Amino acid sequence: MKPAAFDFIRAGNLSEALDALGQYGSDARIIAGGQSLMPMLNMRLAKPAVLIDVMGIPGLDAVRREGDTIVISAGVRQAALMQRPNLASELPLLAAALPWLGHYQTRTRGTVCGSAAHADPSAEIPLCLVALDGEVRLRSRKRSRRVKAGDFFVGMMVTDKADDELIEAVTFPVSKPGSGHAFKEVARRHGDFAIVGCAALVTPDAIHLAVAGVADKPQRRSFPLLDGSALSDALNAFAWDLDARDDYHATARLRRDLVRSLGRDTIKEALSCRT
Amino acid sequence: MSHLSAATRHRVAFTLNGRPVSLEAEPRLLASDALRHGLGATGTHVGCEHGVCGACTIQIDGVPARACLTLAVQLEGRKVRTVEGLGPAADRLSVLQASFRRHHALQCGFCTAGILVSLDAFLHEQPHPSEEELRIVVGGHLCRCTGYTPIIRATLEAAEQLRSDPSLPDSSHV
Amino acid sequence: MVAGLKVAVENWPMAVERVRYVGEPVAIVVAQDRYLAEDALDAIEIDYAPLACVVDPIASLASDAPVLHENAGANLVSDRRFRYGDPEAAFGAAAHSVEVSIAYPRNTGAPMETFGVVAEYEPHEDAYEILANFQGPFSIHAVMARCLKVSGNRLRLRMPPESGGSFGVKQGVAPYAVMIGVAARVAGAPVKWIEDRLEHLSAAVAATNRVTTLKAAVTKEGRITALDWDQVEDCGAYPRAPEPATLYRMHGNMTGAYDIRNLAIRNRVVLTNKAPTGLVRGFGGPQVYYALERLMQRIAVELELDPLAVIRANLIQGGAFPYRTASGAFYDSGDYAKAVDVAVADGRLASLERRRDEARAAGRRYGIGFAAAVEPSVSNMGYITTVLTAEERKKAGPKNGAQATATVSLDPVGSVSVHVASVPQGQGHRTVLAQVVADVFGLSPAAIKVVADLDTGKDAWSIASGNYSSRFAAAVAGTAHLAATRLRDKLAAIAASQLDVSPGQIGFAGGAIFATGNRAKTLPFGRVAALSHWSPALLPDGVDQTIRETAFWAPPQLAAPTESDEVNSSLCHGFIFDMAGVEVDVETGKVRIDRYVTMHDCGRVLHPAMVDGQIRGGFAQALGASFYEELAYADDGAFLTGTFADYLLPTSTETPDIEILHIETPSPFTPLGAKGVGEGNCMSTPVCLANAVADALGVAELNLPLTPARIAALIASPEPALPAANRDRPASLGTVKPGDRTLRGEGMAMVAATPEAIWSMLLDADQLASIIPGCHGVKKLSETHFKTDVTLGVGPVKGRYKAEIKLSDLDPPKAATLSGSVSGALGTGGGSGRVKLAPGEGGVTVISYTYEAAVGGKVAAIGGRLLDGAAKAIIGQFFAALARKAAPESKRTGFFARLFGRQT
Ligand code: FES
Ligand code: FES
């Protein structure tokens, strides 16, 4: 397990990174924390000709609040976000989900945006982005654009990002008064990719439930404030719509069961912790 | 911007356990191989090369990192610590290491270097760890020999000792 | 590589003409470093012609199963029946007959350190020097030498003093050591190979998977009068030495801890298209006890008895030792009933039962499981010959015993070194040896230097040497004790002559040798110990030298199998009794271990902390076998668990603390009274946990690993139906059977072109070139056969492949079958699909398709999670391109091209 050969570009600033991306396009991959990309390089699943390291770009490690939005730049490591003092009040969902993301030893390196870029359908960051209806800010040499999380994730490790684009930041709306959040996941072991992950956001008039690990991308569904059998029916419909499949770690049936049961538990918890 | 081409080796310089070191590395050279083969620092072990087993865990600027998921060129200018740098001297053990020995927290020792490096960093962050916190941190490592309990016990005792006597050789960060 | 079986199977260390399992070496690249070598591997193109394969051992027995080794004629390479006592009569007379059927999975020891070999060849001597983290048994040395076509003295095998764990598995480095030796000869230079994790998981060593049916004849009180075993052992693609040892290692112990005099056994060995098997901690024990102890629980359930009472009623009685089992094992010592009593009391079974009752009252699923197991240790080198008939054994010559060796030496300053042929892998042998020898000489353990590396060219060893079958404490430490004691007796004679007392009066303590009762007469240990170096002339009569003493020890109890196939397969027999309380979460299918108690009788405990470490480590591995670990294969032979993200080892968050209890009944057959303890929990724990889960769920049949999906399936109630509103979607394509990794799907596309236009595109090489995703030009081999190079991928995973496409069952312009195959560095894929074209309204063609595809090779082993998504994406791209191509103006005309697909 050794990577194939590649050039390594240390970008000193954003425009250098964008220039390199523009030049090499699909032959290049951005490396930030490397926690998703490096295993693929080592196994030679991915063989990019060029790696562009963005961790040396000044200012890219900032988490900012812009009004009611938290903006997390490309270089922000997962561990750094966890240490943000107000995280539990600003982004309670992230505060709940981040400890489930990989391990202590990988969160120190892995970045929030890197996890979004990798677009693993079981991963926590894409799930939270979709649950909270966050945005991805993309930038290329020629343009900047913002894409809603629900549109950004296209399929298994496939996103709407063009080859010459860089994820400059991901943004999450700050938790609003009267809302409740909860995150739960079931994995084979602690720290593994989820068999099913659920993230719930409850607002005064709606329930939003996002599910990871079932479809080929995280999916969100919104319902009115249902409970009892109406909620069960809604969850059952959602479970079937996600088109679960069997894989080595779990069956489609278990996944649907978990959407129904874990989904309900997650919603219940979100309801109970409404602010 | 620097562009390191695949075909050639490039000088990479960093601090290893307090001493400046450098080696010639292709961009694709893994940090684990750079340490073991490039610099002969074989204390860092390699058990999977895909980031799961934790045997290769080192500290980069004080935080734990998988050396197998790090490129040698990413170490440029960094402060790297490995298991070789944990003890106060080559022939002395840190408090944590000594506690591992007392508690038989290692059998084959293959996983041990990575676990020590992780826990060393974690105990600096959290001097009052609970058993559960430690189980989660050690959960980022695979040990096939011990069943983990002795590792947890050894760490709880070492944390206690470090708290009660700050002058002990705890492998203060370099 | 030659096996113990007498079958016509060519047993090569790497593929010759035919590849029989995923991970079988096909090519060796020697380069300056592994990076370059992997570059070269990527550049090698292999044209595989797919053959039918079989991965299931029962399917492999079928008369129409594809045969792995044509010379052998069939996949069944050994079929032996054994009969002890009168099982037929016992079954005839029994009040009840209870049966269990199990399929024990494949798993492995997965040491954290992989294989490593450095080989050198000396052409002038025609000799190999190979350094490998091999751990014996050194019977394999003979196999390796023969493989390299040199005499044994021209293969110098060296083993390093430290090794990163083995659990039996490092024995499997042998074929690789041979290959690297050959590579060194060919390269004319030393060659080093460090195995990577993918290589290890796919092709190092697996424990055998086994299909077992076990029947018991039972009285109405629950007393077992006979057992009838039917075992089908799957050794993978080659019966590699020392297989089929996994099947025969337990041969004397097939009645476990129970006093059962009537026994029938049928043992079959089959080959399948999976990696070869070999030594893995537990070695045959987990497979046997999973059946036997599940059976004990089933007897209790079916006869409505207390499971513990059934165990107790059948245990061998305390006064019966040494006890000869029906199949010939000679149990050295034990008091099983007492061990159970102590475990029940000190493990607080009563409180466990209370917890169960409370949990059940609250509607939770809580169960208690038990397991009793006899842990054999110190293997009889002759047990494997039980696979042969008595006739065949006679021809082959006798095999028995277990020769152990140890050397203790004294240097010119009187310091003590110990050397054993055992090769520790982290079990703390050095610590134990230092203590054992220090005690003999009255020194502190720190004063003893234990040398643990081994060199077959220089050191004393035997075919039984090595680190396996838990032989260390019982055999190796005892032999070191023997050597040390001999030296001590000589030193005592020297000291006696110098102090003018009789040797019987000499004592050893605190680094001194003295006359007991007269402390004035004392000599420093070092002075006496060094005498043989400095002034041999002063040695008293009868003392030749005290420089080095090598002891050999072979227990007489390990005789060859008898005419009637009785065999004392091991020297020592420890006892384990485990009990567990577990709670099953019905929603997630996950199991929480509430309490785990393990009682051990391993004879005399030499070093409590080391024994503790063995038990905890064994338990953790068994926990993996119970819930997480399986070396999984798809029906088409694809290997699915090539990384630690798919082959799941328990971590500290999954591994609970356990309660360890001991009683000691010293073995009368070993020098120190010790027995092995390293493997017991690998045998007892999986079935104890399974029994607890079975108790919690009230189910009769369950197989390992007990994954959430398996457990959920065991208790699943009918699923809430697909809501009516969703039923207009394509129907589900039926349940997929387990092991079937075929990707199936169907979909539909509407294209603004006539069926004829689309038809002509499918048969046109240039058009195809622009439709096939990532195509680098199409070569037409015939009207319906095309060859191409494609770049395929999803997200960052990309690779270039050679592809072939064939069209068949043409029904122009309505339907065609497209079949294709791709192969490249990441693996192979193949599939076929039926495409139908039907005219729709307004000049539109409705293209509908169904497909089946399967992916194998590296990408299946490491990227399994990716595959479904990838196949779907690529097939989607194909039809999207077809739609674009067929109706390029569709955008302008506002035409919609709709694509949807469904995969199951
Ligand atoms: S070798 Fe780096 S995590 Fe296993
Ligand atoms: S001590 Fe051997 S792997 Fe942990």
Image: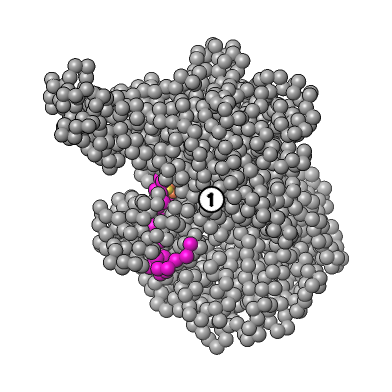
- Going by the picture, which residue comes out furthest to the bottom? A67
Give the residue at x 22% y 16%: C542
Q: Is residue B124 magenta?
A: yes
Quadrant housing residue C181: top left
Q: Closest to the observer: C356 or C521?
A: C521
**x, y (%) of residue A250?**
67, 54
In this view, C845 is above or below C332 = below
Q: Residues within 10 Å of mark 1 (few under 14, many from 20)?
A: some
Q: Closest to the observer: C754 or C439?
A: C439
**Horizontal side of residue C249 vs C311, given as left or right:** left
Quadrant housing residue C342: top right
Give the residue at x 52% y 14%: C396
**x, y (%) of residue C43?**
48, 45
What is the count of numbered marks?
1
In this view, A268 is above or below C866 = below
Report the quarter where the C terminus of chain C lies: bottom right
Q: Is residue C799 magenta?
A: no
Q: Closest to the observer: B78 or C389?
A: C389
- Going by the picture, which residue comes out furthest to the front? C517
Give the residue at x 22% y 37%: C511
Give the residue at x 58% y 67%: A124
**x, y (%) of residue C103?**
67, 38
Q: How is the image coloured?
A: one colour
**Horizontal side of residue C306 vs C70, given as left or right:** right
Q: Determine which residue is flagged by label 1.
A: C658
What residue span does the magenta drawing correspond to? B105-131
* Residue C841 visible in the displayed image: yes
| Chain label for disc 1 | C
In this view, C424 is above or below A245 = above
- Name the secondary structure under disc 1: loop
Looking at numbered disc 1 in the image, what kind of residue is underneath it? Ile
**x, y (%) of residue C118?**
36, 37
